[in-house]
Image: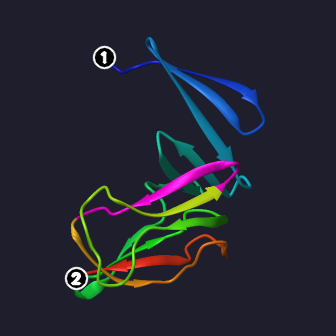
């Protein structure tokens, strides 16, 4: 049986989504052709009608992985430095956007190769924040 979702706009950019007896809050921003949604600690990007979820994470060749800013934001905290070992799920950088903190987490175990941001810096979407190997 397919779940039924009910969406209610609370105010511009903020929605309550009901699935059965569960209620979630989803925040949405951006123009129609390039939307960003924040839900359950993750950022999703809907660009030109195609979903790229979760946003801000890209793979590179050679076994390295870069983690990028999912939306325009301010770097609040940088919690790692080059050479630091990290485990999947560890928070590496904390961003602030739309009055919310957005933790950028490691998607797997590895070592920080480089950090390309600093606290207080304004970053744009797809700006690489941390590279891991």
The CA span between labels 2 and 1 is: 40 Å
Foreground pick, 49 / 87: 87
Query: How many other residues sit within 10 Å of disc 1, few (<14), some (14-19) or many (≥20)?
Result: few
Where disc 1 sits, the SS reads loop
Query: How many other residues sit within 10 Å of disc 2, few (<14), some (14-19) or many (≥20)?
Result: few
Left or right position of 75 against 78: right
Foreground pick, 85 / 66: 85
For marks 2 and 1, give the one nearer the viewer. 2
Q: Which residues are magenta?
A: 97-108
Up the image or down, 16 lies above or below 89; here it is: above
Q: Which residue is mark 1?
A: 1
- Counting every numbered tag in the picture gives 2
Up the image or down, 9 lies above or below 29; here it is: above
* Residue 15 in view, yes or no: yes
Q: Quadrant of the N terminus?
A: top left
Up the image or down, 73 lies above or below 10; here it is: below
Left or right position of 118 against 110: right
Identify the residue shown where x is 78% and y is 36%. 12
Up the image or down, 65 lies above or below 73; here it is: below
Label placed on residue 63: 2
Residue 118, by quadrant, is bottom right
Queried whether the magenta region covers residue 8, the answer comes back as: no
Foreground pick, 8 / 114: 114
Identify the residue shown where x is 71% and y is 27%. 9
Residue 111, by quadrant, is bottom left
Where is residue 80 drawn, in percent x and y?
Answer: 39, 73
Where is residue 29 drawn, in percent x and y?
Answer: 70, 49
Identify the residue shown where x is 43% and y is 13%. 20
């Amino acid at each position: 049986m397919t779940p039924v979702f009910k969406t209610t706009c609370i105010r511009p950019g903020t929605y309550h989504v009901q699935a059965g007896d569960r209620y979630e809050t989803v925040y949405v921003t951006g123009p129609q052709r390039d939307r960003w949604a924040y839900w359950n600690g993750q950022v999703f990007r809907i660009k030109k009608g195609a979903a790229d979820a979760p946003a801000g994470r890209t793979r590179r060749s050679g076994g390295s992985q870069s983690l990028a800013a999912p939306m325009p934001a301010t770097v609040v905290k940088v919690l790692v430095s080059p050479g630091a070992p990290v485990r999947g799920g560890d928070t590496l950088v904390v961003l602030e956007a739309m009055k919310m903190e957005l933790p950028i987490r490691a998607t797997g175990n590895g070592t920080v190769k480089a950090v390309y941001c600093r606290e207080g810096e304004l970053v744009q979407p797809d700006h690489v924040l941390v590279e891991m190997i």
